[in-house]
Amino acid sequence: MSSRGALPVRLLAVLVPVWVAGLALVVVAAHGFATTPREVADLVGIATLFVVVLIAERHPVPVEGIDTRGVSLGVVFAVSAVVLFGWETGALVWVGALVLANLVDHRPLVRMSYNAATFAIGCGAAGLLILPFAGNGPGDLLAKVVIAFVAQFTVNWLLLSLVVSVSAERSFVPVAWQNLQSVIVPVGLMASAALMLVVLWQRSPFFAAALIGPLLAIALYQRSTHRAMRAMRLALTDPLTGLGNHRHFHERLQRELLDAQERGGSLSLCLIDIDDFKKINDRFGHPVGDRVLSQLATRLRQGGEGFRLGGDEFAVLLPGYDQREAQLAAASIVERLASVSLDPGVDMTVSAGLATYPSQGVGRDELIRLADSALYWAKEHGKNQVRVYRPDVVELAELKKLASGADKAARYRAAASLAKAVDARDVYTGSHSERVSELAARIAVRLRLSDELVELTRLAGSLHDLGKLAIPEEILRKPGPLSEAERLVLERHPQIGYRMLESLGVDPLAEWVLHHHERWDGAGYPDGLSGEQIPLGARIIFVADAYDAMTSDRVYRARLTDEEAVAELERCAGTQFDPAVVAALAEELGYSKPALRAVVA
C-alpha cells in the first residue's frame, strides 16, 4: 500500500473500520493507563519494554519466504507487557513504539496507521480473553501467555491477510494460507520466548533484563547473517530472471559431476537458446524481450535446476537422468516454453542441445562443449527442437561453424576431433583412425618431412576415413566380406570425406583424404592416379592404413603379426604401395629387408 494518491473504495472499506476500532482502543487504553496508579519500579519496567519494542520494530528479523521487512520481536515484549501490566499498557507500548519507529524510518503513513490499529485490536482481544485467569501460578501464567499470543497473532494475521488480498485483488484464503506457512515457525519460537520472559519477570525484573539482551542480540545477528547470505545469493543469481548465473552454473555443474562420479550415476546437461531472440528485441523493444526472458525462466524452474548463462542462453541440470530420460525431459521443456503466453504478436520458440555424463562427456568443459555442439546442430536443422549430442553429426556442425572464421589452427583442432566420431561408428576398428594418425606421423618423420608436414600428415591420418560417416552402418559393421555392391558403396568414402573437408578450408588434407586409396601402379580409386602423381601425404596414409588393418582383428579373419604385415607391405611395394614409404615404415618399426624376405619365404 502507498499513502500517495487516492485509495480504491474496496481498500477503504477494509481500512476505515480497522482504523476506527484501533483508534478507539488506543483512546481507551490511554485513559485506563493514565487513571491506574503504578509504582516507580513498574514504570521503569514499562519504559524498558517500550525501548526494547522500539529497537525490535526498527530491526525486524528477516525470514525466508516473507517479502516484507521481516518478523518483529516486538510481539514478544508487547505480549509480555499485556500479561504483566494489562492490555492497556501492552497496546500503548506496542503502538507507541511502532509509530515512533515508522516515523523515524519515514515509512508510509497508511501502512503505519493500519498496522498500529491491528496491534491495538490484538492487544484488546488478548486482554479480554485472559480475564478469567487472574492468578500468577504456573498454570495461569502459561494460559495467559499462550492465549494472549494466539489472540494477538490471529488478529494480526487475519487483518493483514485481508488487506493484502483486497489490495492485490487476490483470493483471501490462499493469501492467508501463504502468510501462515511463512511465519508459523518463528511465531511459535517467539511465543516460547514470551513465556520465559514473563516467568523471569515474575521472579525478578533483573533476570528478565538478562533475557532481553540475548533476544535482541540474536535478532541483530540474524539480520547481519541474512544480509551476508543475500549478498552471496545476489553474486550467484541473475538479477532479471532470478535463476542462477554463469558462475553459479559452473559451480553446480562441477559439484553434480563429482556426485555422479562418486555414486556411479549419470548427469545430463541441457543448453537452451531462444530462436531469433534479436528479432524480438529489435521489433518489440528490450522491455518486451526482458519479459520473454522472465517468463521463460519461470517455466524453466519447473523442469530442473535452471540457470541463465547470459543473453538468451539458458541451461538446465538434470542429475540422475540418463540420455533417454533427459531427452524426454528436454522435449517437455521445449514444448512447455513454446506455450508461454507472451505479448500480442510475440512468438517464441527455443532450441536445446543435450549431452550426458558419462556416456558422452566426462569433464565439465567437455560436457558443456558437447551440449553446445548439439544446440548448434538443433539450430542449423530447423530450430524449435531438442538434439542429443551425436559425434558423427555434431562434430561436423562444429566444423562448419568454424569454417567461416579466420583461425586456421582452430579449424584443424576441430577437424581432428572427427576421428573419434568415425571410430565410434565402426565397431571393428576401435581406435583405428588414431593409430593410423600416429603411424603416419612417424613415417613422415622418418622421411625427413618438415614439422608442419608431419603435423598435417598426423591430422590427415586421423581424418582419412571421415567419409565413412555417410556410409550405412550395416555395411561398416558387416561381420564378413562385402558384396560387390557394398564394396562400391564403401569405396565412395574418399570422395565424401573430400567434399566434407574441401568446404572447410583445411587444405591439403582434403586432397590427401581423396587419394589415400590410389595405388602406385594406377589401379586404385577414385581417380586411378599412379606413382608420384599421388600426393605424398596420401601415399603415407595408404601404407599406415593397410598396416593397421592387417594387424587388427576382424570377425572374418585373424590379425597378422607385425613382421607378417611388414613383409606383406614389402611384397606389394612397387605395385600397391610407394616403395620409399614402405621402406620408411620398415625402418621405423625396426625390420630389415633380409628379415622380411625370411618371413615371406
Image: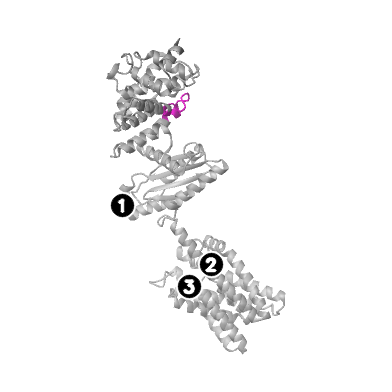
The first of marks 2 and 3 along the sequence is: 3
> Is residue 22 at all visible to an observer of this figure?
no
- The reply to whether dot 3 and dot 1 touch (C-beta < 8 Å) is no
The answer to whether residue 494 is magenta is: no
Question: Which residue is identified by label 2?
Answer: 222
Range covered by the magenta-colored residues:
421-434
> Residue 315, image x and y in percent?
43, 47
The answer to whether residue 429 is magenta is: yes
The first of marks 3 and 1 along the sequence is: 3
Which mark, by number, is residue 284?
Answer: 1
* Amino acid type for the residue under numbered disc 3: Leu
Residue 218's place in the image compared with 405, above or below, is below
Tell me how far mark 3 sits from mark 1, CA to CA. Answer: 41 Å
Which mark, by number, is residue 15?
Answer: 3
The one nearer the camera, 372 or 516, is 516
Report which quarter residue 413 is drawn in.
top left
> Residue 63, image x and y in percent?
53, 64
Q: Give neighbour class at mark 1: few <14, some 14-19, many 20+ (Cα, 10 Å).
A: few
Q: Give neighbour class at mark 2: few <14, some 14-19, many 20+ (Cα, 10 Å).
A: some
> Residue 189, image x and y in percent?
61, 67
The one nearer the camera, 139 or 483, is 483
Quadrant assignment for the C terminus: top left
Q: Secondary structure at mark 1?
A: helix
The first of marks 2 and 1 along the sequence is: 2
Nearer to us of marks 2 and 1 is 2
